[in-house]
Image: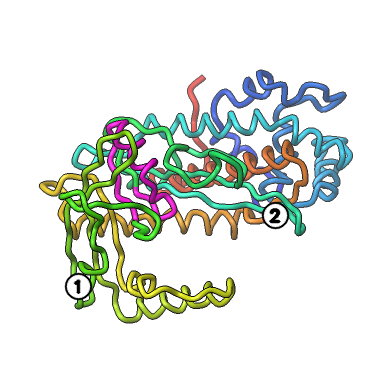
Amino acid sequence: MSPEEPVSEDWELLKSFLPLEWRALARRTDATKGLRQDKSEEKCLRTLLIHLACGYSLRETVVRAREAHLSELSDVALLKRLRKSEEWLYELCRSLFEETKLAADVPILGRRMRVVDATHVKEPGKTGSVWRIHYSLGWPSLRCDYFKLSASRGEGNGESLSHLPVRTGDCLLADRGYSTAQGIHEITNQKAELILRLNPQGIRILSQDGVPFPFVQRLQGITRPGQVEQWNALVPLAGRTPVMGRVCVVRKSEQATRLALKKLQRKANKNHLALEPQTLLYASYVLVFSTLPEAEFSAPIILEWYRLRWQIELVFKRFKQIARLGHLPKSDPASARAWLYGKLLVALLTEKLVAHAKTVSPWGYQLHST
């Protein structure tokens, strides 16, 4: 749906990509309950998408919807309708996720590879609330298989692997924000595996003999850019058996090291902090912890797999630049959640449209048997 023609004939194409039960979901979630006129689920969703997909303000949306004979709502009434549609928008997203499970990614050496991360979305103003979207992509399809919306602060709302539903055979690729002993133990207890960027200063790692892992000593022996090393290691947690895995390390190129040091220095200057010698040393390396068996996944393969995590950063970038997900123009929790679910719906529909366009003859419509 383009900004120039938000209510054009493209609606028929877009409608063919919605979940089959999208109208029933509107009735089941009471999304259209209370409308005095224009109670059509179709008109309601089209009006919401003018606001959500095209980025128009509430006021401009109601004007365009009125001109297209979709609705006769005020901007205040549209905001209330958006709030009332929160559950509907969520269920539409969930249904699209269910479709992806019917065409799941092909397991790689028996593992279902998933790239996980989280991003922030902020309401406008100095006191605007910050929300966190937890997101997971399957590999190699790069289609979203899970998302969760939470507050950014408060107990249980931080970046944590505990937010993700996992099952036996999953392998999660995650950044150092997820580098916690609690998260590693929770995932391995569910018979899943990990490729996780390490934050050596934020997690306790032991050598096989139970002493603190000598990161500085080991790293000082890796002097050539591109040199790869690995060591067996343990992740302890009080009251539990330590998780066994490997620390896999590669030394960065000189250019990559300079960029990392520049970023660290800029952050330290902003916060008026002095960088510790260990921090400067770690900037020259990528350290990854993995529970995958060495017989099937060598250290270079583990590090190559970790590089795929960048794909989710590109997804977030597309969300914020194309779907305009980076700025949350709603000031109360209910409308903020509904707006975010709506944006995610737009992103998921876009994924589905792109995937369809790559694999079928482009006449534009999916055919459903009647």
**Quarter of the view holding residue 83:** top right
Q: Look at the image and give the residue range highlighted in magenta.
A: 173-197
Q: What residue appears at the point 58 percent right and 75 percent down from the top-left corner?
A: 272
Q: Give the label on residue 222, or none.
A: 1
Q: Give the label on residue 326, or none.
A: none
Mark 2 burial class by Cα count in 10 Å: few <14, some 14-19, many 20+: few
Task: Find residue 197 and report its horizontal and vertical position in percent.
Answer: 34, 56
Q: What residue appears at the point 68 percent right and 32 percent down from the top-left corner?
A: 86
Q: What residue appears at the point 20 percent right and 53 percent down from the top-left corner?
A: 207
Helix, strand or loop at disc 2?
loop
Q: What residue appears at the point 25 percent right and 55 percent down from the top-left corner?
A: 212
The figure's colour scheme reads rainbow
Q: Nearer the viewer, residue 355 or 286?
A: 286
- Above or below for 321 versus 196: below
Question: In the rendered structure, does residue 163 fall within the stretch colored magenta?
Answer: no
Question: In the rendered structure, does residue 183 fall within the stretch colored magenta?
Answer: yes
The residue where tag 2 is placed is 3
Q: Amino acid at mark 1?
A: Ile
Left or right: 182, with 330 as reference point: left
